[in-house]
Image (spheres, helix red, strand yellow):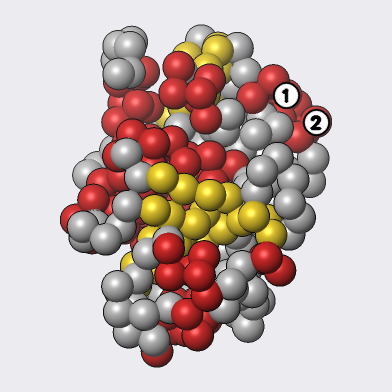
Amino acid sequence: MSSLYGIIGYPLSHSFSPAYFKKKFADQLIDAVYEPFPLTGIDQFAPLLAAHPQLAGLNVTIPYKESVIPCLDEIDPVVSEIGAVNCISIMNGRTIGFNTDVVGFELSLIPLLQPQHTDALVLGTGGSSKAVAYVLKQLGISFRFVSRTTKDGCLSYNGLDAGIINAHKLIINTTPLGMYPAVDGMPPIPFDAIGQQHLLYDLIYNPDETRFLQQGMMNGAAIKNGFEMLQLQAEAAWDIWARTSLNETPE
């Protein structure tokens, strides 16, 4: 019987993973199937596992990166620190949560960093923002979260001004604002303060250039979308699943 892999989240019409893994399995002659599992609530997670005992691994996307954690048997130490899961390995019915967003983000960000990128603004406070924050800490980059409200020490969008933007030359969008199909959306930051020393990184990969990135590019900033990060985290997830299938402990 073919191994079964998939992705949980809602909605999943935008998801890159099914096409990516189906092509990977076909190209590498891997006897496996990858399916989307759109769950309208995390309470559907346990019934999903029961209905598909052949499941060997799952990707996790919005909105379940945090809420899935209590449903798992075990979590990786990185997940314990971050508080978000985007990859689950399943072996003999036992579920283990990992975060491969950290791998994808770090490896795609490092080549772009310049000496002025010592301070960052992280737009959004969801599961993806936690992986971003973890990587920034590892790289020694100071950062502030930006949210709609000034909760837990976050800056608010209304409180952003030219001085704050100028002091943070790295700006990372972890929100879904601007993601297909709502492509007109973008984080409400003062783009007039963006300049050539800035790097704007958007975790969104569809469309290729969000309005956030377009506005940055118009002001001379370097830009990066989330496609490479997505590819890198997908490969890191497959590495975990492949090791699990060989009964090895993922590092």
Q: Amino acid at mark 1?
A: Ala
The residue lying at 39 percent from left, 36 percent from top is 137
Q: Amino acid at mark 2?
A: Asp
Q: Marks 2 and 1: in contact by CB < 8 Å?
A: yes
The residue lying at 65 percent from left, 34 percent from top is 66
Task: Check the image and name the residue furthest to the front.
Answer: 163
Task: Read off the residue under disc 2.
Answer: 43
* Above or below for 138 versus 128: above
Q: CA distance from mark 1 to mark 2?
A: 7 Å
Residue 128: x percent and y percent? 54, 46
Task: Read off the residue under disc 1.
Answer: 46
Residue 10: x percent and y percent? 69, 51
Disc ID at residue 97: none
Query: Would residue 217 be seen by someone viewing this image from the given angle?
Result: no
Q: 51 or 9: nearer the eye? A: 9
Residue 40: x percent and y percent? 79, 46
Residue 147: x percent and y percent? 67, 56
